[in-house]
Structures are given as C-alpha cells and as structure tokens.
C-alpha cells in the first residue's frame, strides 16, 4: 500500500500575489432602457469593472472580473481591497472553502449585493486559474454539454434607438451570425412599445427568435395587459415584466400566458433565486454570475434550475457566461453584448445563430492595453514569485 505520508503528488501550491483594479469602460453612446424613460435612472455612459489577478508561488495565474452599472464600482473595489490579503498563502484549488472565507471576512455587510459581487471577481479568477492549470477551457473543466450556445443580441435594441436604426441593427446582428434579437420595452407609451415590437417582428419574419425586456417597469395590471397583447408575436420570452422581487406576480404571469416569462438578472444570491424557483416565478431563469458572487454560487443556482426543469439564459458578461451556459443540460441562451470587448484582447465568435465556446485554457481571456488606461485604482497584496 502506498505511504500517503510520502505522497508528493498532492497540490500544495499557495497564492502568493493578488491584484485588484477598478477599471471604467466607456460606452460609445449613452444607453437608455425603461428605467431611464420612467425617471428612475440616468442614461448609462460607462461600466465599472472590478478586475482581479491571482498568481501562485508555482507561477499559475488566474484572471477574474465583476462589474457594476451606474453606481457601486468604487464600493466593490474598496471591499475587494480589504479582502485580497485574506487569500495570501491559501491553496488556490480550495475554491469553495475560499469563497466561504471571503464571505465571512466581510460578513457584517451581508451575503449578497456589493459584498458578494466583490467576492465574485476573486472566485472567477480562481476558477480561471484552475482551468488553466489543467490546460482546459473553463467549460471543459466544469463539464460541457455543447461546443456552442444559441445567442441573442441586446445592445442594438435599446429604447433610445429609433425604429429605423433598430431594423438596421437587427440586420447587422444576423449578418454576424447572431441567432436572436431582444428589444427593450416598458416605456410610458405602451402603444409605441407594441408598434416597435410589431414592426421588428414583421422585419425579422415570423420564425426568427425575438425577445422583449421591460426592465421591471410594469405593475401587475399593466403587465397582464401587455403580456396578453404580446402573445401574438411568437416571442421566446417576456423579460422582467414586474419588479425583480415580485416572485408571486411573475408566477401568475407564467401560469397565465403561453409566452415564457424570464427574470433573475437582478437577484444577488442563491437564496433569492431559490425563492423564485419555489414559487414558479420564471420559465427562463437569468442568473448573473458576477452579481451573485461568481461561478461557485452560480453553479448552485444552475443545479436548482435544472432540478426544477427550468430553462436558463445567463445575463450579460458573455465572455464568462458562454462557458457556464455550455454546461447546462437543456439548451440555453447566452446574451451578446459588445460592451466589454475593449477590455480584452480576444473576441467571442458567432456563427449560424450560435456563439462558439472558446477552447483556450481557462476563460481564454487576457487584458488589453486599453484596460490599463482606463484603470482608476489598483491594489496588490503579497509578493509576485
């Protein structure tokens, strides 16, 4: 029998160095959805990215990120700066243990929201490191069901975009090999919403996948009326028709209408997703890995969704979610946004309505030179080997 005490094949690597950076990625044009038209938010002009880089004493490296829109970026960075030293000396393979350790280190500010969104960047970096060390893509490391995922474009369908430009944008998306189009709705003039949806449906044809997203701006009576009128357009889903925490209201719509109801992007913990699942509040669940604390909690949500027979369509951050969607047993959707592309040297590839899962080790991403110019703050813990 092998002497376990003398077994040197185990992993005894340690985290030696951690870098956290606050990076602000500008958007080409101010972005408006229903939350802007109803006066609840201002147009979005940039995205705050929390970048984490981890290196071990044996020279293995991992890259992770989280994000915030409109507000919260400096807060995420401040929390991550406090947490980074906690990882020094730890074994990078113990990802679940490290997630708990980071969470307890900041337990007084809660287990959801900004606190766990900061943890998410560390968690993604640890998974990236683990996959790179195995010389596998993240999808392969986790166990992929497919080499490509059907994808839809959102960035061309915002409410500030005139109808004529919407049609041009849909044509551009289809020419790029993107397989679906999502339109923003939820503005005060509901007749205008319906006109835009009707026009784009006619432009695309009856069979091309089309979704709409109200960004939580309807009350229950309005949502019922709009869902009823939208049934005729053969939509893949109606997204966030109600407040993101109204699980019961979403469940009523899901039971009443044939068109699937999609929601979940604003939820910030496994517990919040579980409440929606228990109440039947979504046909398509839309978890966002950075918003719920990274890949580790995302996999828990995905397992709950699969057990309860739900479809899944992770929100935003296609560079990360393409790997996670590829691991779901039922055919998922992944959301195509160009907004984070300038942050990285690599690009996602779309073909025949689908996004190809990268085969490079880990996430398959490296930071661009531009990211350094957009860096507002950075902090390091430990010493590079």
Image (cartoon, rainbow, N blue to C red):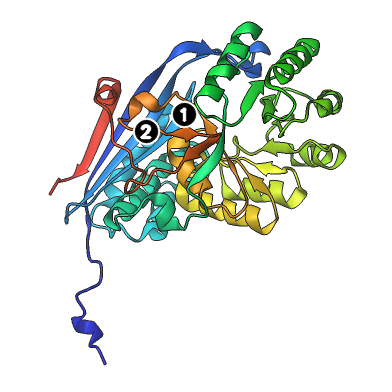
Which one is in front, 228 or 206?
A: 206
Quick one: label 1, few (<14), some, or many (20+) residues within 10 Å? many
Q: CA distance from mark 1 to mark 2?
A: 8 Å
Q: Quadrant of the N terminus?
A: bottom left
Tell whether 290 sits left or right of 367.
right
Position of 208 relative to 291 (above/below):
above
Q: Earlier in the sequence, mark 1 or mark 2?
A: 2
Tell whether 169 sits left or right of 121.
right
Tell whether 301 sits left or right of 83.
right
**How far from the left and from the top, in percent, is residue 209?**
67, 31
Position of 152 relative to 126 (above/below):
above
Which one is in front, 194 or 199?
A: 199
Residue placed under numbered mark 2 in the picture: 50
Q: Residue at x 37, y 33 (%)?
A: 50
Q: Residue at x 52, y 33 (%)?
A: 316
**How far from the left and from the top, in percent, is residue 255?**
84, 42
Q: Are marks 1 and 2 in contact (CB under 8 Å)?
A: yes
**How far from the left and from the top, in percent, is residue 187?**
71, 14
Q: Residue at x 32, y 38 (%)?
A: 365
Position of 132 relative to 250 (above/below):
below
Disc 1 is placed on an element classified as: strand
Mark linked to residue 68 = 1
Tell whether 381 sits left or right of 364.
left
Disc 2 is placed on an element classified as: strand
Q: Residue at x 27, y 28 (%)?
A: 368
Query: Which of the 4 image quadrants contains residue 92?
Result: bottom left
Which residue reaches farthest bottom?
A: 1
Query: Which of the 4 image quadrants contains residue 67?
Result: top left
One can see residue 4 in this view: yes
**How far from the left and from the top, in percent, is residue 199?**
73, 14
């Amino acid at each position: 029998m092998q002497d376990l005490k003398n077994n040197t094949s185990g992993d005894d690597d340690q985290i030696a160095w951690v870098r956290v950076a606050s990076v602000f990625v500008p958007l080409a044009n101010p972005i408006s959805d229903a939350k802007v038209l109803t006066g609840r938010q201002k147009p979005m002009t940039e995205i705050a990215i929390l970048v984490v880089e981890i290196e071990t004493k044996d020279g293995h490296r991992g890259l992770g990120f989280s994000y915030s829109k409109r507000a919260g970026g400096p807060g995420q960075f401040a929390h991550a700066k406090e947490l980074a030293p906690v990882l020094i000396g730890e074994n990078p393979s113990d990802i679940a243990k490290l997630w708990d350790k980071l969470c307890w280190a900041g337990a007084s500010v809660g287990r959801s929201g900004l606190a766990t969104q900061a943890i998410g960047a560390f968690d993604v970096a640890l998974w990236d490191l683990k996959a790179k060390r195995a010389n596998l893509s993240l999808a392969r490391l986790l166990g992929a069901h497919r080499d490509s995922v059907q994808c839809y474009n959102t960035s061309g369908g915002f409410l500030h975009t005139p109808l004529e430009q919407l049609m041009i944008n849909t044509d551009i998306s289809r020419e790029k090999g993107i397989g679906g189009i999502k339109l923003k709705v939820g503005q005060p003039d509901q007749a205008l919403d319906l006109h835009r949806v009707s026009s784009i449906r006619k432009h695309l044809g009856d069979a091309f996948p089309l979704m709409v997203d109200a960004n939580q701006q309807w009350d229950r009576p309005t949502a019922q009326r709009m869902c009823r009128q939208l049934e005729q357009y053969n939509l893949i889903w109606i997204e966030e028709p109600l407040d993101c925490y109204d699980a019961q209201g979403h469940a009523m719509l899901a039971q009443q209408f044939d068109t699937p109801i999609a929601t979940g992007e604003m939820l910030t913990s496994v517990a919040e997703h579980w409440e929606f699942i228990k109440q039947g509040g979504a046909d398509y669940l839309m978890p966002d890995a950075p918003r719920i604390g990274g890949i580790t909690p995302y996999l828990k949500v995905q397992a709950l969704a699969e057990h309860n027979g739900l479809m899944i369509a992770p929100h935003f951050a296609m560079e990360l979610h393409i790997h996670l969607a590829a691991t779901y047993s039922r055919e998922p959707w992944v959301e195509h946004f160009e907004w984070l592309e300038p942050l990285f040297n690599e690009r996602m590839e779309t073909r025949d309505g689908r996004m190809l899962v990268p085969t490079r080790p880990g996430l398959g991403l490296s930071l661009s030179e531009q990211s350094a110019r957009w860096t507002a703050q950075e902090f390091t813990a430990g010493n590079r080997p």
